Image: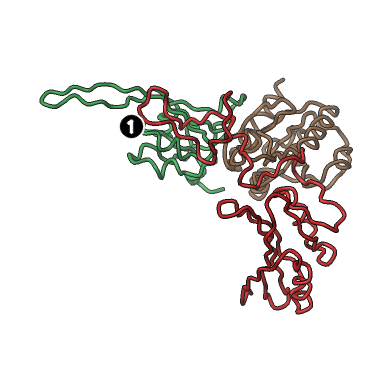
Chain colours: A brown, B green, C red
């Protein structure tokens, strides 16, 4: 997948939602800082299942949720923008801003090197918290997945 | 999963009647995520001299900025702010994360399962 | 385990040779390197490095004082590879020039004309964002500046 070539695997980890095994939705975790640990926490409790490193899918996913979790430095912003652009080319993408940093800069709102949240592409869902609980991530993922299935 | 989530990772709720609009929480908030509007009002009671009190008009917490440090709760001289367990209050717009007096007060009564 | 933490202050001209002599005595790894803005006391920065002996855990802190207006000191990066990253960061954040090394390309900043960790560097977001803690105009109390904002950072249009 092209995104792996241009971003680090730390920036992008692919998950499946355990409670929606048939949804063929992939959850892309753009883990930029500590909020991404909550994604791992959701995985540790079995709510999210990590995909194998990079298997070619027999069927393309019907939808993708990009979870932006962590502080967006101005230096990393172009990489995030590129990642989103490439995902959009592959199919429908919903963006979740997970936690205060991705939403507004959070505790780093006044830092000279930090963007005040996602500003390069539209966001469908803002999950508050610093960090939010893993249960909040999964609840909102389920809601997004269900709304995409209905669409 | 644990049965009862810690309120420390939940939400900060407001007891409007306990708030004196002293602005301490607003001034101490590291992310400037609290906004408070109030106006002075004269209170006249029988047998007492008239006194001026601040009446709370609006209290807002922007949960898109809040870092859940709890400093507002610590500095409040009247214990008008409290941790509550609700953690599930996402929004589809950025401004939808800003919660007003009514919602902050509603959280007082709620437990996590109500969300 | 850290057994002792000695602090040695040297002139900038003795910076590299002092660190080299500690390296010869086994303190050959840069644990961290940064700068301290001494603005409140004097017009100077302190460049600070912590050298460790990874075997024993012993460490020493070496500092040198440089002029705040042209902060410059020889690079340690040729001798200590571990100084490379920290010098880049210190150059970017404090404007310290480390001479003799290849480049100090910025890691985080998009424009090179800022030195955000210098105390005189305005916290732009705090200047531009209206402070919700400011007293209302009708209030009797004098309007206070938000924490972390200096009066000289405020221009008339704000």
Question: Residue, x 42% and y 29% (percent of image)?
Answer: C135
Residue B90 location (% of width, % of height): 58, 30
Quadrant of residue C54 within the rendered picture:
bottom right
Q: Quadrant of the N terminus of chain C?
A: bottom right
Q: Is residue B60 left or right of residue A118?
A: left
Q: Residue at x 70, y 48 (%)?
A: C93
Neighbourhood count class around disc 1 (C-alpha, 10 Å): few under 14, some 14–19, many 20 upward:
some
Q: Is residue C26 above or below residue C42?
A: below
Up the image or down, A19 lies above or below C26; here it is above
Pick the residue in front: A18 or C94: C94
Percent position of residue B23, x then y: 40, 34
Q: Position of residue A84 (x, y in %)?
A: 79, 32
Q: Secondary structure at mark 1?
A: loop
Q: Is there any visible trace of residue A46 in the rendered image?
A: no
**Residue under pointer 1:** B20
Q: Residue at x 68, y 51 (%)?
A: C68
């Amino acid at each position: 997948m092209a995104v792996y070539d241009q971003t680090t695997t730390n920036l992008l980890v692919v998950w499946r939602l355990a409670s929606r095994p048939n949804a063929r939705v992939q959850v892309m975790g753009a883990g930029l800082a500590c909020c991404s640990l909550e994604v791992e926490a959701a995985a540790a409790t079995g709510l999210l299942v990590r995909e194998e490193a990079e298997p070619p899918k027999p069927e393309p996913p019907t939808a993708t949720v990009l979870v932006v979790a962590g502080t967006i430095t101005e230096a990393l912003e172009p990489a995030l923008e590129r990642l989103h652009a490439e995902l959009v080319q592959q199919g429908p993408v919903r963006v979740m801003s997970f936690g205060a940093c991705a939403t507004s800069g959070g505790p780093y709102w006044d830092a000279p090197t930090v963007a005040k949240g996602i500003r390069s592409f539209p966001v469908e869902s803002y999950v508050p918290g610093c960090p939010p609980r893993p249960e909040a991530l999964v609840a909102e993922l389920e809601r997004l997945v269900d709304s995409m299935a209905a669409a | 999963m644990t049965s009862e989530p810690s309120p420390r990772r939940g939400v900060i709720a407001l007891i409007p009647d306990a708030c004196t609009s002293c602005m301490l929480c607003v001034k101490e908030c590291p992310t400037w995520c609290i906004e408070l509007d109030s106006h002075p009002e004269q209170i006249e009671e029988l047998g007492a001299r008239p006194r001026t009190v601040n009446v709370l008009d609006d209290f807002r917490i922007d949960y898109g900025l809040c870092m859940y440090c709890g400093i507002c709760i610590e500095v409040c001289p009247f214990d008008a702010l409290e941790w509550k367990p609700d953690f599930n209050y996402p929004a589809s717009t950025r401004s939808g994360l800003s919660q007003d007096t009514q919602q902050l007060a509603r959280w007082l009564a709620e437990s996590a399962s109500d969300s | 385990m850290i057994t002792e933490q000695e602090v040695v202050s040297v002139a900038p001209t003795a910076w590299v040779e002092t660190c080299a002599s500690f390296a010869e005595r086994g303190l050959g790894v840069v644990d961290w390197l940064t700068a301290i803005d001494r603005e409140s006391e004097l017009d100077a920065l302190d460049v600070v490095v912590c050298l460790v002996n990874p075997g024993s855990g012993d460490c020493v802190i070496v500092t040198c004082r440089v002029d705040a207006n042209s902060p410059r000191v020889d690079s340690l990066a040729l001798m200590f590879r571990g100084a490379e990253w920290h010098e880049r960061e210190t150059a970017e954040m404090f404007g310290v020039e480390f001479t003799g090394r290849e480049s100090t390309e910025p890691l985080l900043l998009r424009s090179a004309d800022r030195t955000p960790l210098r105390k005189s560097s305005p916290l732009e977001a705090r200047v531009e964002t209206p402070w919700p803690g400011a007293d209302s105009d009708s209030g009797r109390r004098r309007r206070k500046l938000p924490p972390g904002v200096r009066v000289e950072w405020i221009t008339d249009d704000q």
